Image (tube, rainbow, N blue to C red):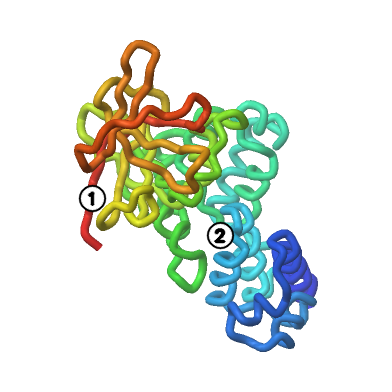
Amino acid sequence: MTSVPLKLKLGKLIKSGLQAAGLRQLDLAQHLQVSTSAVSQMLNGKTAPAAIHLDKIFQLLNCSRNQVFIMRDLLARIRSGMHELRSPVNEFIRSTRKERSLSMAKLAHLSEIPVAELRILETCSTVVPSNEQIMALAKILEFEDDDIQQLLNDLPLYGSDSLGENVQEQGASYGSISKFPAQIPVISIENMLKFNPALEDIKNFVWRNYDKVISAQTLDDSISSDDVFAIVDSGNNFNPPLPGSISLIVALKNFPETNDTVIVKSKKSDKLQLKRFVLEGKSVSLKPFLCSAEQQKPEANDIEWVRKVLKVVISSL
């Protein structure tokens, strides 16, 4: 009987996501390739979606990582029949916080992790903390090396039937470490186009919207993992289109110098551009990345943002 309210809660979350996305029950039914009656039963808490359908719902509604964890947790509780379901990760973070006599609000203040995210870390059985969250908590809660290793060992490594590809990759990437794993957040062009430097620091934006992480072992010795992020996407999503798949290591802070490769967001384009940066006095010009065409001088207010690219890898598809 306890699963009925959980089904209803999950259905309400999906219904709210549909409304926020401006979609109808019919749109969801077509996306899942099920009847509208089946969707109606799901939204009204009569049935619970299969895990594979929940993955497709996440894609359709463009759910955030937190939304994914919450809905995955609800489905896990429904399947297990347990109203309260906590993982070793939940228990470790919760018990360590209480041992330090810290309220969740106080820990949020000290760690700069929002209370809503801390609540997910302590209650959602499917949660996979980000590297940034682990480091912030370790500093405040004074984790020992053995504690950190145990926490990482307890992270769930979900398959396609449970948590989805993006979160699975993040959890699997921690691996075996002696202290903190050096990781680089990877973000898609689609998400990067949403960045507005007037509203948010780029580092906060990247860690809030990243798709997965990759090991810093892929970097050159001259590049620090703390100062970069990666953009990985099809070359067709750049302007002009580029061949194959593109992987960029992008600087978070360093301003480009003459002849540096840069990634540029222009107000006149809905795609990112790879360019060569030329600075002459206070005048900025941009050269094409792959050809010797004449350089272009951007209009004064055309560039929304520009970031220095430290490494470019073009792979065939």
* Amino acid type shown at disc 1: Ile
The percent coordinates of residue 197 (x first, y second) are 55, 30
Query: Residue 294: which quarter of the image?
Result: top left
Residue at 65% x, 53% y: name it. 123
Residue at 34% x, 31% y: name it. 296
The percent coordinates of residue 17 (x first, y second) are 70, 62
Q: Is residue 181 above or below residue 90?
A: above
Task: Please give the residue where the numbered disc 1 appears in the rendered image.
Answer: 314
Quick one: 13 or 138, which is closer to the camera?
13
* Amino acid type shown at disc 2: Thr
Give the quadrant of the N terminus: bottom right
Residue at 21% x, 59% y: name it. 316
Residue 133 shows in the view: no
Task: Please give the residue where the numbered disc 2 appears in the rendered image.
Answer: 126
Give the quadrant of the C terminus: bottom left
> Could you tell me which secondary element the residue under label 2 belongs to?
loop
Q: Crowding near pointer 2: few (<14 within 10 Å), some, many (20+)?
A: many
Counting every numbered tag in the picture gives 2
The percent coordinates of residue 35 (x first, y second) are 67, 88
Question: Left or right: where does residue 174 sit relative to residue 156?
Answer: left
2 or 1: tag closer to the N-terminus? 2
Question: Left or right: where does residue 102 sit relative to residue 257?
Answer: right
